[in-house]
Amino acid sequence: MGKCWEEKCTKCGLCCHEKAVYGKKLVIDLDSWCEFFDPKTKQCTVYAERFTRCERCKKMTYLKAMFASYLPESCGYVAWARSHHLRFAKRRILQFIHSKNCPQEDSDDHLYKAFQA
Ligand code: SF4
Ligand code: SF4
């Protein structure tokens, strides 16, 4: 996998945010992101060393493009997999939440309520 594979990323930055799959929904928190993500530019600030600097950062592979449920339909890799009839994860409705606007109760509880909205 080389440059051509990496160029499929549209640099939307959505996969660098906190996210959860909840039934038929993929919920992405636009107020919470990886410590190395710059929300102004939507770029990774440690791109070249991202896999050594960030434990949670995982390389995009063919298998993830095909099966990973946490990637939005708009992701360039998902689009690639779908165009080759290789996308096997369910289509999920994308829902954005803003955790900073949620009531400051127990964090899981307020996310749960946001999912019900
Ligand atoms: S380290 Fe990985 S998850 Fe974090 S901002 Fe960079 S690309 Fe995104
Ligand atoms: S969701 Fe897909 S297109 Fe968007 S930044 Fe992540 S890998 Fe790139």
Image (cartoon, grey):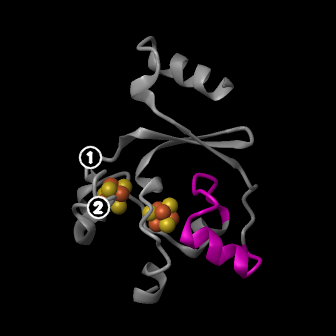
Tell me the quarter of the image containing the C terminus. top right
Whether 17 is drawn above or below 83: the answer is above
Q: Is residue 9 left or right of 48 when viewed as pictured?
A: right
User: What residue is shown with label 2?
Assistant: 44
Instruction: Report the residue that reaches farthest toward the top.
Output: 105
Residue at 47% x, 71% y is: 10
Q: Is residue 113 magenta?
A: no
Q: What kind of element bears circle 2?
A: strand
Tell me the CA gap for discs 2 and 1: 9 Å
Which amino acid is tagged 2? Cys
Residue at 58% x, 52% y is: 70
Name the disc covering residue 111, or none. none
Q: Is residue 76 magenta?
A: yes
Q: Is mark 2 within 8 Å of ligand 1?
A: yes
**Circle 1 residues within 10 Å: few <14, some 14–19, many ≥20:** few
Q: Is mark 1 within 8 Å of ligand 1?
A: yes
Residue at 43% x, 24% y is: 101
Q: Quadrant of residue 75?
A: bottom right
Q: Position of residue 105 (x, y in %)?
A: 44, 11
Which amino acid is tagged 1? Glu
Q: Quadrant of residue 51?
A: bottom left
Magenta stretch bounds: 67-86
Whether 8 is drawn above or below 16: the answer is below
User: What residue is shown with label 1?
Assistant: 35
Residue at 71% x, 50% y is: 92
Which quarter of the frame holds ligand 1? bottom left
Q: Position of residue 49 (x, y in %)?
A: 23, 67
Q: Position of residue 2 (x, y in %)?
A: 42, 87
Q: Are marks 2 and 1 in contact (CB under 8 Å)?
A: no
Q: Is residue 115 left or right of 107 when viewed as pictured?
A: right
Q: What kind of element bears circle 1?
A: loop
